[in-house]
Amino acid sequence: MTLTPNIERTLWNISNQLRATLKTSECSIAVLGIVFLRYVDCNKNGFLFLPDIARFSYLIGLPKKRAIGKAINVAMFAVEEKNVELTGLLPKIYHKVEDKVLVSILKEFSAITVDICSDVLGNIYEYFLSKFAVVDGQLFGEYFTPESIAKLIVYILSPLQGKIYDPACGSGGMFIQCAKSFEKDNNRIVYGQENNLETIGLCKMNLAVHGLTGDIRHGSIYYDVPCDNIGVFDFVISNPPFNARGIDKEKLWNDKRFPYGLPKTDNGNYIWIQIFLSALNDKGRAGFVMANSASDAKYSELEIRKRLIDDGVVDVIISVAPYFFYPTVLPCTIWFFDKEKKTSGHKDTVLFIDASHIYKQIDRTHRSFSAEQIEFISNIVRLYRGEPIKTEAEGDNLTYKTFPNGKYQDVTGLCKAESLKNIREIGYSLNPSRYVGIVATTISNSEFYSTLKELNYELQHLNSKANRLGEKISSDISKMLEGKE
């Protein structure tokens, strides 16, 4: 679900009203709490028991003279009392907001109609990450996984049955997309871990709205390790923090999750990669988002990547264009592992897909995959694996146009099934652009200047970020020097 401009304007107006009395971090949580009540009240499937005093229709019908903030807090307590999985997780800060503001907010939300089957809370959360990052002049420390990226990963993994795990589950968007592929009447539990308590609340609200049960644990995945999450999951699907720093590797020595060793650099990418792999059972598959830099990282990270490739678990690597993620403009890569690949017909190859030229432009700085594009990219993987393709979304049968014989073949500039022998010879790179080749094309003047404008915008953004970091470093050094004088 992509938020319409009207919904975005409404949300921004609401947040501006709340910012008068709440902290920035509280604004998004307060809005999401009301969104939660709004959509649970609309949901006819009855996944949660919603007391009458917690119904959105009840709250919006209260007399203006009533203490609306207190009434919303009571509503949150009432929901938690009847739904123990949400105990202590719903926001109760509405008494801080003027009643006239809350009345206005309730009215604005009552006018919004959104598909209950979509990732409502996650998409609104993503919107606030973008807006508040701009307003506060700083970036939030976490990223919500764009819906189209999550869909693509789920389409390729096909988690129809089995145990699903996300050790960086955030707002639960990955789980929501997985749920849409579940078999009917399959009452499955999803498993996750998250370090931020507020985000766990958001995740459990999101799961509840979609009728899912989740075993979501609180704690740092680096150090707070559940004893039952090694080698047991059929699917791992995740979007970890890119290039995480400050991980205390001294606490990770002799940890069974890192059979290939720990990277010597202050970068968590190859720690996360091994966390995903170690959670899989002998037939498990993983799909996760990863920073582009991990594909060609050198030194100790290269040594880990060599062992991953030589052990035959790397299945598919897909490059994605920039502008998919709030609030970063950087491109990314999607990695897929398959523990059962060693017994398949493609055990000696890795499929590389360059999807950096495949996207739907939402606005100047935001991109997404269309339903047709998601189906097309996932069909490339299906053909490679010898699995049946899907053509539900492709109106022009793009898959058959590209693969007219209904069989996988390498396509210059798009995909290449590369042998492990050649991957070793090229230095164990997992960068799709090193393998798929380039198609010579001519572009119009308008396309050229449009691309140039985008690149210039990205350069300005990176320069601005560099300047902020430079100022912070300079300030920190000055404070350190002052303390020595």
Image (cartoon, rainbow, N blue to C red):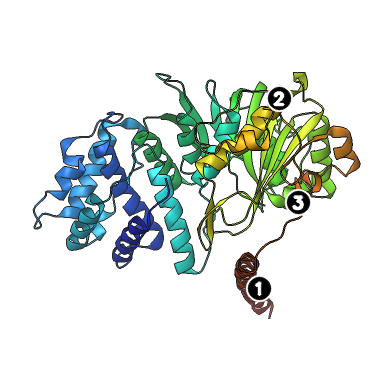
Determine contact: label 2, label 3, CB under 8 Å.
no
**Screen quadrant of the N terminus:** top left
Find the distance from the CA under tag 1 to the CA under tag 2.
43 Å
Find the distance from the CA under tag 3 to the CA under tag 1.
39 Å
Where residue 339 is drawn, which disc sits there? 2
Q: How many marks?
A: 3
Amino acid at circle 2 = Lys
| Placement of 450 over or under 358, stated as above or below | below
Percent position of residue 16, x then y: 32, 66
Q: In which quadrant of the rendered view does residue 230 lie?
A: top right
Is residue 86 at least partly visible in the picture? yes
| Placement of 200 over or under 105, stated as above or below | above
Percent position of residue 21, x then y: 29, 65
Q: Nearer the viewer, residue 309 or 168?
A: 309
Label 1 belongs to which residue?
A: 470
Q: Nearer the viewer, residue 121 or 407?
A: 407
Amino acid at circle 1 = Gly
Label 3 belongs to which residue?
A: 439
